[in-house]
Amino acid sequence: MKRIFLFFILSLPIVLLTCSPPPFNLSISEAAKTAKQLSYVGQIGPISSMSGNQGNEDVVFIPEKDGAGGITLQAGFLYSQDPLNGNQASFVAYDAGQGKYIYEGGSQWLGPLSTDAYANVLVQSVKSLHNVIAFQIDDVTPASNRFGLMIGDTIGHTFTPPAWIGLTAQTTGNFPPGPYSAIGISIIPTNNPGFDRAYMLLADTGNGMYREARYHVSQAAPGLTNPSSIFRTTELDLVGYGVIPAGIQRVLYYYDSASTNAFAMWNTGSHWTCVKWTESPPTVPLWQPMPGINHRIDALLTTGELFSTEDNTARVYDPTTSTGSLEAEFVLGDLRFIGEVYIGGVPTMLFSQALWFNQQVTFNVYSLPTSKVKTLGQ
């Protein structure tokens, strides 16, 4: 079973000090060289394991957005993947009375682990107090794709289960009318303190055509709002023009508003295929294959570059070249990329590192200006 993390948050770092010594010698970590080039944001924990499955549980800390354009490490969300319990999310906060981090309410189950090369859960910290959104993606049945907000409460000590809503025209009022289902979803950070953006590739199950849509991700119910959903003029015949194969049920999808290029990637079981397109004239996609991009893409960075963390190795690709050239590569090891954010208006990448000791986990959070990511591969 494959464990794949996708996280997106907007942040301003607040460093926390802890009296507990780090339960792990970073110098012996495979990621030591990389971590030394990152900025230390703070430490969270120790916290009891969500599953008691140390050694098999892969877990990250997602800082909470404070609703004022920043983050706090005083509270946040744990996203865990392990063979026994699948995908889970929990809400934790620092309790001053107890002098430690505690779970607020129980863990919420987000589905089984992925059995293929795709992530089947996307988790997004929402820009408001104690809110997080999850996207659940079915590779076989797009009509089953859905999203839901989860809300934590440090007073009542609760964490609500997702209020699931389907990602189809029939179940989501913000979708364009017609038999649409979302088959590709990505979250792009913004410098606005109130929202991030979600970009989706929508499949018209009636005629095999596609539309591209844009939404705000915010605390406004139900979590996705529609300020200007359709940003291409009409449906695109991506299959007829040979951009993507017929019958595909799932892609990784990204849209670059600066270049107006869209990117789609899919896995055949043996390798990844990446393409990009734009629309000119209307309804006719101008596209090209990107054979140089052959590892799973996890983010479109604000620099316009594509970022992969497949196999715990970071790779930075330049999609403006004819094939999509590899610009940099470096080891992540036990570092997990949790998203690109804005800090003081500067695009910044965040990483989480889980350090285990006696069934407890402590998290280190690191940052790096996005403009410097290629220097880590030199």
Image (cartoon, rainbow, N blue to C red):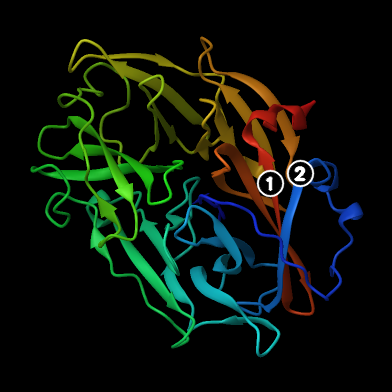
Among numbered discs 1 and 2, the one appearing first in the sequence: 2
Residues at marks 1 and 2, CA–CA distance in whole angstroms: 6 Å
| Residue 91 placement (x, y as % from top left) | 51, 74
Residue 294: which quarter of the image?
A: top right
Q: Is residue 254 left or right of residue 372?
A: left
Residue 109: which quarter of the image?
A: bottom left
Residue 372 versus residue 100 in the image, above or below: above
Residue at the image point whose x is 56% and y is 81% from the top: 103
Residue 96 versus residue 262 in the image, above or below: below
Residue 197 versus residue 128 in the image, above or below: above
Residue 295: which quarter of the image?
A: top right
- Report the amino acid beneath label 1: Ser
Of 275 and 348, nearer the camera is: 348
Is residue 85 shown to the viewer in this render? Answer: no
Tag on residue 38? 2
Dot 2, how many residues are within 10 Å of its Cα: few (below 14), some (14-19), or many (20+)? some
Q: Are marks 1 and 2 in contact (CB under 8 Å)?
A: yes
Residue 312 versus residue 242 in the image, above or below: below
Residue at the image point whose x is 45% and y is 69% from the top: 130
